[in-house]
Amino acid sequence: MQKKESDFWSFVAQPKNVFWQIRGIILLCFVLWFLFAPEVDHRVWILFYAFLVYAFGFFVYINKSRVKAGPTYFFTSFLDIVLITFLILFTRGKGSDFFLLYFLVIPFASYAGGLWAGFSLAFVSSVFYLAINRPDLATLPANHLFVKIAILWAIVVAFNAGIKNLERSKAKLLRMFDILNQRTSELEKSQAQIETIYETSRNLGEILNLEEVVDELLNIMQKILGYQFCSIFILNHPNALSLLGEIKEGKKIKYSEPVKERLNEILRKVTAGKPVRIFDLTNDFGYEKESDGFKSLLAVPMISRGRVIGVLKAQSKRRGAFLDQDEKIFSILAASAALALENASLHQKTKELTIVDELTGIYNYRFFIEKLSQEIKRAERYKQTLSLLMIDIDWFKKCNDIYGHPFGNQVLTDLAKRIRESVRDVDVVSRYGGEEFAVILPQTNKKDAQMIGERIRHRVESNDFVVAESGAKVGVTVSLGVATYPENGTTPEQLIEQVDQALYLAKGRGKNMVCAV
């Protein structure tokens, strides 16, 4: 309720709205006069029509773009003074209540146009009022005319004094808000830094994927610490660093293959285990040649189990961008990052030993499920499509029964090779189980996935498999199912279910074909 009232008064107090409120009050005064006056001078009707004409004209004019409001309000207020003066003259002269309208128009002129606008119209109205009452000046007491005029001038002075006081109060309030916002920002930054320490120690320790660790570190440095230029390096051996990811002008960049970095003087010092913080690179003779336009720098080592494994580096084009607090927070982040990167690296090496199918040399089911989940998340993040192929060998049991299991294993191995040769390097080929294979096709729509599936099907059908013992050539065919993210599902389970249905459809229609759902 208080907010609605505040919005109402904020709307009412705008100069444009006050301007039209005064038009409305003048119009109301005309209406009341016509209703209750014992008789109406026809000249009042003329003034009424004149008021309607110029009020409508200014309504059209003031709603145009690029109209200077101040001069417009002043000129309209002047016309109002003229109108009010004639109303006083044509009604009851010195005793006319229309004099009170001066007290509306002149303060508004001061409000919209400033002190001199108010004084100018107060002077004009005083002259006009004295002019129309000139015949009675000699006989009337001073309080009949001059007191009214004095009150009018006093209102202008008081009104402008009040406005200036409000403006000073507003300026003080704005300065106070600026200081408060600055203090609040500092408190929020400190709070964010405290949360960074906690979240980094908790979240980074739970991430076992190297790419995700790098991504999370870049997010922390950019979004929480606010660094627009920063880098993550891994130490390969004492004289070589590799760049895993960086932020350039607020843009996050990750490298699937680490980029070798020259071990310059700054990085060499950090890899020795010492943080480096430079307030002004342009005045530091030892580092000026390496500044690349940056004015300040902060670099800290990532140390795990007493050994430096990498470097976190932040740069800024502003002098003195990094303070003692930044170095402390960055060092804490580096310690957590070192542990997370080392854990992820060890996990990756262990994982590589368990993700390959021993017979075919391609990825196994476990890796396929994990990779599919990752690719779906990536597709969702970047608003891309993703397709999944499921491949099944036709009559595989019959082939085993006739030619033996060694030939069946040979078919599985050769088929895996032909599938790999038919797809891109970014596509993930896996053995799903038994005689079934799965292919993850990132950034691929359904139509293109069907074309890839048809290419695999044709490659298998057109090239016979040779029995090693007898040299006999055996024709083998495959059936393929296609499903696409997000059209056929948004989770690994949904996509696998849909691609299975597509494969069953291909089997049911006679095998040796590609079907999609």
Image (cartoon, grey):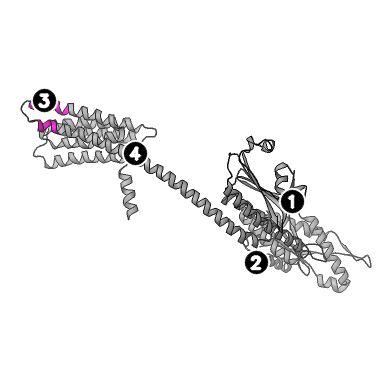
- Work out how far the residue at label 3 is from the one at label 4, CA to CA, in angstroms: 42 Å
Between disc 2 and disc 4, the foreground one is 4
Q: Residues within 10 Å of mark 2 (few under 14, many from 20)?
A: few
Between disc 3 and disc 4, the foreground one is 4
Residue for badge 2: 493
From the top left corner, tell me how far across and down residue 130 is, in percent: 14, 27
Mark 2 / mark 1, whichever is N-terminal: 1
- Work out how far the residue at label 2 is from the one at label 1, CA to CA, in angstroms: 39 Å
Check whether the beta carbons of the residues at disc 2 and disc 4 lie within 8 A of each other: no
Say whether residue 139 is magenta. yes
Q: What range is drawn magenta here? A: 128-147
Three-letter amino acid code at the position of disc 4: Arg
Image position of 103 with respect to 373: above or below: above
- Work out how far the residue at label 2 is from the one at label 4, CA to CA, in angstroms: 66 Å
Residue for badge 1: 235
Say which element carries label 1: strand
Residue for badge 4: 168
For residue 384, say whether it is visible: no
Check whether the beta carbons of the residues at disc 3 and disc 1 lie within 8 A of each other: no
Q: Residues within 10 Å of mark 4 (few under 14, many from 20)?
A: few
Three-letter amino acid code at the position of disc 2: Glu
Q: Nearer the viewer, residue 278 or 237?
A: 278
Image quadrant in which you'd find residue 298 = top right
Q: Tag on residue 134?
A: 3
- Work out how far the residue at label 1 is from the one at label 4, CA to CA, in angstroms: 60 Å
